[in-house]
Image: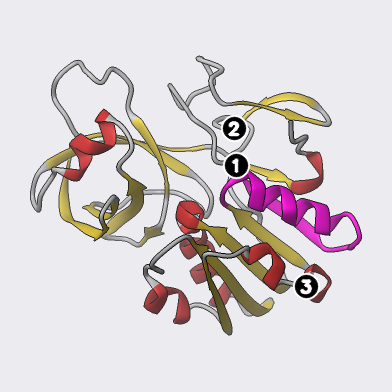
Amino acid sequence: MAKIIFNKQLEIDIYHMKVAGNYKGTMGQFYMLRGWSSLNPILDRPFSIFDLDGESISFLYKVIGEGTHLLSRLKENDDIKLFGPYGNGFPQVKGKVALIGGGLGLAPLYLAAKNLFSDRLVGLVHIYLGFQKNPILIDLFEKVSHRLTIDVGGYISQKININDYDYIFACGPKEMVEAVVKQKKSSNTRLYVSLEKRMGCGLGGCLSCTCETVNGNKLACKDGPVFSGEDIIFG
């Protein structure tokens, strides 16, 4: 059991939660959260690690169903259970790197940007973030990038030239990720995508997060959520 430091509402249905404790994890991994004592909802809720230090861990989430609604009601010093870290995250890379996030797809990208920005082998970190309405947490991303590009109401995938970078990390809606993957086909840039899939158990037992790849069906929770972009088959 852990204590909540804050659970801030950023937009009408978007929250930023910070939890006290020394937790493990790498960029792109996720935790399962449970902030209720009743048996229902039965399943915990999965969230990418937004930030991590020796004293706390934080997450971004959108209120969609009963579980996230219960999480949104938690206050400072309330108890919460965390399980993790789970999954395979983004690799350590070097050279020129771009991060592309759409909507809440920015959630796993902040920790990635912070790690890359402080790495002497990474010469350049550019971040591209797309929003339907109001941008969030821009001040944080500005501090961990050499250039930040924001798009509101459009297509952030159209703002980037894939060939300018050695590596691309992307996370967001299926349409955005698919558009980035299509650009990759004409480039030697290495692309890694974090898939947004509904997860049940987070451990590979329920098969609810199955995704199709060139190497057969894979599980986003166990084999991912980060995959090589060229391996994903979009239905």
Task: Say whether marks 3 and 1 touch (CB < 8 Å).
Answer: no
Q: Amino acid at mark 3?
A: Asn
In-image side of 57 versus 145 (left or right): left
Q: Residues within 10 Å of mark 1 (few under 14, many from 20)?
A: many
Estimate the spatial distance between the alpha carbons at disc 2 and disc 1, rounded to whole Å: 7 Å
> Which mark identifies residue 161?
3
Pinpoint residue 22: horizontal percent, then vertical percent: 29, 53
Give the residue at mark 1. 195
Could you say which is closer to the camera, residue 181 or residue 51? Answer: 181
Q: Mark 2 vs mark 3: which is more N-terminal?
A: 3
Picture mark count: 3
Estimate the spatial distance between the alpha carbons at disc 3 and disc 1, rounded to whole Å: 21 Å
Q: Residues within 10 Å of mark 3 (few under 14, many from 20)?
A: few
Pinpoint residue 81: horizontal percent, then vertical percent: 23, 35
Q: Residue at left 91%, top 60%?
A: 186
Task: Say whether marks 2 and 1 touch (CB < 8 Å).
Answer: yes
Task: Say whether marks 2 and 3 touch (CB < 8 Å).
Answer: no
Q: Residue at left 33%, top 37%?
A: 64
Pinpoint residue 69: horizontal percent, then vertical percent: 22, 37
Q: Which residues are magenta?
A: 172-195
> Which mark identifies residue 59?
none
Q: Residue at left 58%, top 83%?
A: 147
Q: Is residue 149 above or below residue 169?
A: below
Q: Amino acid at mark 1?
A: Leu
**The stretch drawn in magenta includes residue 186:** yes
